[in-house]
Amino acid sequence: MTHHHGSRVWGFARYFALAAAAGLLLLPLATFAQTSSSASGSSTDRWLHVRVISSDNRGETVRVNVPLDLAEKVLPAINKNRLHSGKVTITGADCDGLDIKAILEAVRTSKDGEFVTVQSDENDVRVAKQAGYLLIHVTDKSGKHHIARHMHHSDKSDDSPDKNDKAEKSQTASTHESKVEVKIPMKVVDALFSAGKDELDLVAALRALSASGEGDLVTVKDDENTVRVWLDSKNVSE
Amino acid sequence: MILLAKVALGFGTTLAVAGAYTFREGVIRVDVDEFHQGGAHVHMWVPAAVVPMALHLVPTHHLHHASLEAREAMPVVRAMFHELRNYPNTVFVEVTDGDQHVRVATESGKLAIDVTEPGENVHLRVPITTVEDVFAQLERAGLRSAIRDGKEEDWNWRN
């Protein structure tokens, strides 16, 4: 009887050992399945994308995709130089003596419209507030100007100017200007300057950015590079 | 004969358990190929679970030194890898310059770094949890040394 009972226990132990071994063997697969099933972030996540495309013949391209949630969590952990707890300390020298907070307060409380419009041979600058966005457009024409002057000199020195050559030079000159377009939600600007007098609150700005809609934030175009910084809910850049 | 079968079963079960435990954390994969005469070709597959275990065998003073070196980056690394777990399949950085290509991404919960250029290819896959484990051990080693030396107050990684 005792022997019979003992063999039953032994048999049970063997089955248990086999089941445990099988379970442990399948554990990695279960873990893998769990990992695979969890999506990369939630669908409501906001992603900051940076894309730089160089127009040189090497075709240099840089693509950076950063989830704003990740940036929000990591930034406060960086304490180096002026960056601490997700805030950057700025000094009066950085602002060139301007009271940025006062200017922003004036912009924030004012109605939509154009605040700065400068048109010159070197630059066109436009700063405006429109539908809750701060818009800054800068066209740097100094490169174009330089080329135009260069052409003027070379034309003078050339005794028999070729019309086709002139046309080609003119086409080249027209591309030598750079355009910068910035479109930032006012809420983000407010959050950025919400920390204190001499600080920029990057984490607060990121939170405000998360809450804002999708779209382009910065685009830079010149004859060498095209830079685009934008926000959307996709985890891959276009 | 039955005894032999039992021994085989025991051995097999132990092997299965050990194998399951070893590969539970995934595999660290390092592939380096240098395409020139005498260039190195390194292809390594290491069970990720082995790394934290191996760290226990590293002399304390070496660990302490490493933890001091990594001390400044520790909070950032901790926060970043903790968050990276939420993005198991994502390309974070991709740079293409002619024949050169650099990619930093996560693939199935692993940190993936690929560098491809005409003369050399490097591919690295490390489970994110392994990196976290390694840094946690370094952190503990540093804290232990600080307590031993009475400098616990200086060890403010958590802050």
Image: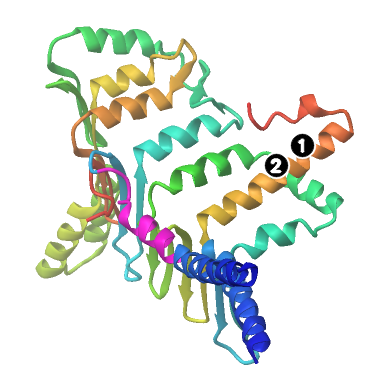
Q: In the image, is residue A71 above or below residue A114?
A: below
Question: On the rendered structure, is B24 left or right of A153?
Answer: right
The answer to whether residue A141 is above or below residue A137 is below
Q: Nearer the viewer, residue A107 or A233?
A: A233
Query: Main SS of the magenta segment?
Result: helix
Q: Position of residue A116 (x, y in %)?
A: 21, 20
- Which residue is painted at 23% across and 58% down in the image? A156
Q: Residues within 10 Å of mark 2 (few under 14, many from 20)?
A: many
At x 56%, y 26%, the residue is: A84
Give the residue at mark 1.
B143
Chain letter for mark 2: B
Crowd band around label 1 with a 10 angstrom C-alpha radius: few (<14), some (14–19), many (20+): many
| Boundaries of the magenta span | A28-42
Which picture quadrant has residue A56? bottom left
Tell me which amino acid carries mark 1: Leu
Give the CA separation, mark 2 to mark 1.
Answer: 6 Å
Measured as percent of width and height from the top left, residue B107 is found at: 40, 62
Q: Is residue B48 visible?
A: yes
**Looking at the image, which residue sits at the far right?**
B149
| Residue at the disc numbered 2 | B139
In depth, the one of A16 and A71 nearer the eye is A16
> How many marks overall?
2
For disc 1, the chain is B
| Circles 2 and 1 on the same subunit | yes
Vertical placement of residue A193 versus B89, above or below: above
* Residue A175 picture location, percent across and down: 20, 54
Q: Are marks 2 and 1 in contact (CB under 8 Å)?
A: yes
Residue pictured at 53% horizontal, 67% vertical = A12
Q: Kindly state the secondary structure of the residue where label 2 is placed.
A: helix
The structure residue drawn at horizontal position 44% and vertical position 48%, both measured from the top left corner, is: B85
The C terminus of chain B lies in quadrant: top right
Magenta residue check for A31: yes
